[in-house]
């Protein structure tokens, strides 16, 4: 199934998405306000040959979405070249199932880019690869060294963790996001630029 202009326009604008959020809106808006974008990054998007359409799949409970959606929001606002529409993951399985992480996971956020004619450019899922690697290392160390995880297998669902382990894990994620924020933000922008630069290269060759 392809994403049509009509389906895209059924999505929410960024303002509409924020208005309907029931949790984490303050965090999202604080992240949007404080993200640091370089003049070069803004110029890259501002100088695109046409406005790109970006389909965003998200939910307001997702930590990766709260961290990364604001970066896209600022890039759109600063460049004037990204037309965003937002869809909630759990209400739009027809869209979500087109962008499964590793073909199986409904990971969010998803940023799917299309040109003016809605030809797909490429998509970006969840978080930067470098941050995923750092997070996996952090979790492995946590499970190996923290007494709260004694006897608990790595990867155990958050829903079935004992209260102490769940609280410790959530705090570890919060600390990790704080410590890696600057790196993560830069990596998001770098990966998005790389995705679009590949499209521009293919466009010139074609």
Image (spheres, rainbow, N blue to C red):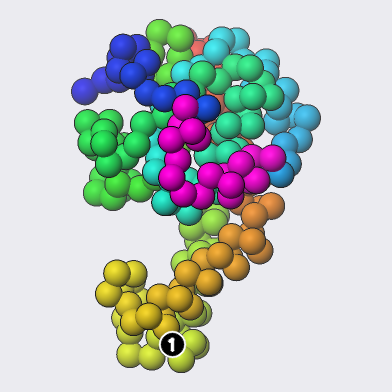
Residue range highlighted in magenta: 16-33
Measured as percent of width and height from the top left, residue 42 is found at 71, 27
State the residue position of label 1: 148
Is residue 120 a member of the stretch shown in magenta? no
Q: Residue 124: horizontal and vertical position, in percent?
A: 45, 37
> In the rendered image, which quarter is residue 108 located in?
top left
Picture residue at 32% right of the left edge, 39% below the top = 89
Relative to 153, say whether 131 is above or below: above
| Residue 118 appears in the picture as rendered | yes
Image position of 188 (left or right of 166): right
Secondary structure mostly seen in magenta is helix
Position in image of residue 99 (x %, y %) = 31, 37
Name the side, left or right, on which 52 lies relative to 62. right
**Is residue 132 positioned above or below 68 on the image?**
below
Of 98 and 162, which appears nearest the observer?
162
Secondary structure type for disc 1? helix
Which residue is found at the position 37% from the left and 15% from the top? 9
Question: Which quarter of the rendered picture does the N terminus lie within?
Answer: top left
């Amino acid at each position: 199934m392809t994403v049509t202009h009509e389906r895209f326009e059924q999505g929410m604008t960024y303002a509409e998405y924020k208005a309907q959020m029931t949790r984490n809106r303050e965090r999202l808006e604080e992240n949007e306000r404080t993200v640091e974008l370089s003049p070069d990054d803004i110029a890259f998007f501002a100088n695109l040959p046409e406005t790109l359409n970006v389909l965003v799949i998200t939910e307001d409970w997702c930590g990766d979405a709260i961290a990364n959606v604001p970066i896209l929001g600022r890039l759109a606002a600063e460049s004037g070249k990204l037309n965003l529409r937002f869809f909630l993951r759990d209400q739009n399985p027809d869209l979500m199932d087109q962008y499964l992480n590793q073909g199986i996971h409904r990971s969010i956020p998803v940023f799917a880019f299309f040109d003016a004619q809605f030809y797909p450019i490429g998509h970006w899922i969840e978080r930067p690869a470098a941050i995923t690697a750092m997070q996996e290392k952090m979790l492995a160390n946590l499970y190996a060294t923290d007494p709260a995880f004694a006897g608990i297998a790595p990867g155990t669902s958050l829903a079935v963790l004992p209260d102490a382990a769940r609280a410790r894990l959530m705090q570890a994620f919060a600390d990790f996001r704080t410590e890696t924020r600057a790196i993560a933000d830069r990596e998001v922008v770098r990966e998005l630029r790389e995705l679009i630069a590949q499209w521009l290269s293919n466009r010139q060759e074609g």
